[in-house]
Amino acid sequence: MAHTHPEIRTRFAPSPTGFVHIGSLRTALFAFLFARKNSGKLILRIEDTDQNRFVEGAVENLLKVMQHLGINFDEGFYLDDQGKVQEKGEKGPYLQSQRLELYKKYALELVEKGSAYYCFCDEQRLEEVRKEQIALKKPPMYDRLCRKLTPEEVREKLNEAKAQGKNPVIRQAIPEGGSTLVPDLVYGEMTYEHRILDDQVILKSDGFPTYHLAVVVDDHFMEISHVIRGEEWIPSTPKHILLYQALGWAPPEFAHVPLILNPDKSKLSKRQGDVAVEDFLSKGYLKEALINFVAFLGWNPKTDQEIFSLQELIEQFDLKKINKSAAIFDLAKLDWLNSLYIRNKPLRETVALALPFWELLGINTESYPKEYLSEILTLEKDRLKKLSEIGERTKYFFAQPEYEKELLIWKKADANDASHKLQKLYEFFTNLPEGRFQKTSLEEELKKFIGQNGFDNGSVLWPLRTCLTGMAASPGPFEVAATLFIGLGKTEILKRIKIGIDKLA
Ligand code: GLU
């Protein structure tokens, strides 16, 4: 029976693998929303029992990403003002490798109680058993040979092992018959027959626990009331419940969240494209868009609302609205959300976020007036899916464009005509007073100039736009010229028209 908890305490328990997987962010977000909604606590525990997978700096990186996204922890770890990882909370240590004594104590207690046993089988024997079972088309499980040892035999083998400087592992003893009920807040009640559960190792020979033992001991001592984690852990849960029972502890409530799949229904993994949250951020996805998107991976408000701030998510989050079926990772939806957030963000903030993407192209943004950068962004922001696109799309505002002279020729005209129009434009801009370079007046003046000369719009505006941008597709010539005027002045416009004329000569 799960107990009634005086306080909601949930946790996010990643392994320090070096980057934040999008699925991991989803789990963290749901735990965060659940804790905040219920005025509970969110604990960050680092599950580093697999020392082979430990990556230096992983915790720091994780905290940076989480902090940036607005997900903070009440206990566990945080970054101080210097950006150094610090620990806080009364139920620590929160790093599993610092809790080895505790795991050992309970592994031995389980042995004492007959719910676990020493296993002396070596790799070679285990491999043979595995092969045999596979040949018989049975699921490979430990054949429980060491479970049959008498207490005397165990004592003898322990002494023998000790003499050789070896440590036996400890395995969980799954009860022979019967079944275990797994109650789940998302999936309902599931029953697991004991005969399909493996006697898994809970304490390894290096003294480290495996996930199963560590997770139970930690969730118990950290007084976790609700475990929120990925669906892939459901089959492990009956083993955990059996451990709780054996130790006489009340298990927490479980809420498993559905798998995340690619649109082709394959599992979203590291190999399948890009799943690192850091990469999404560095590609120019806004944190608001990413949070909004990730919230919908397996959760649904059951209304038409699609746009949620983190605060709104906290208010509306409900474990009951988590879906059982797999969530589809739809990049097109993320792009759509991101463009929406870019469009609606206050311009000043968007400029600040865009600066690094310009800098990446070697543009020294500090040497330009802020107003210029704002105007450039205004021209493009409604077309951006990601902020990273800003660089390539606007680089002509920072350097004279390079292009082939053919691009200057409008489809209904020829080189002579283009050259003639550009010469006329050169005169027009030379004589245009500085006060008329603002977008609306410039448009008025240019149209007047076209009308008075009896020109076609296209035959003038096409080569003009090409001179200014060097691109086949870009914002229109009026706004580009007006913007260039703000940042680089009239001389730059004239210079670019002159380059066009020279190309055609
Ligand atoms: N360390 C596990 C992981 O990396 C945590 C599973 C759990 O939350 O129990 O996903």
Image (spheres, rainbow, N blue to C red):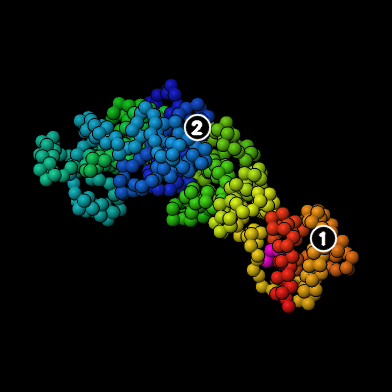
Label 2 element class: helix
What is the distance, in whole Å, between disc 2 and disc 1 at their CAs?
Answer: 62 Å
Query: What is the number of callouts on the image?
Result: 2
Give the number of the mark in front: 2 or 1. 1
* Left or right of residue 152: residue 105: right
215, 32: nearer the viewer: 32
Q: Earlier in the sequence, mark 2 or mark 1?
A: 2
| Residue identified by numbered label 2 | 34
Q: Amino acid at mark 2?
A: Phe
296, 92: nearer the viewer: 92
351, 161: nearer the viewer: 351
Which image quarter is the N terminus in?
Answer: top left
Mark 2 crowdedness (10 Å alpha carbons): few <14, some 14-19, many ≥20 = many
Q: Amino acid at mark 1?
A: Leu
| Residue identified by numbered label 1 | 432
Q: Residue at x 53, y 29 (%)?
A: 37
Height in image: 4 above or below 179?
above
Question: How far from the left and from the top, in percent, is residue 395?
Answer: 63, 60
Question: How far from the left and from the top, in percent, is residue 89?
Answer: 39, 29
**First to last magenta residue range:** 466-471
Height in image: 45 above or below 61?
above
Residue 272 belongs to the span the image colors magenta:
no
The answer to whether residue 474 of the structure is visible from this angle is yes
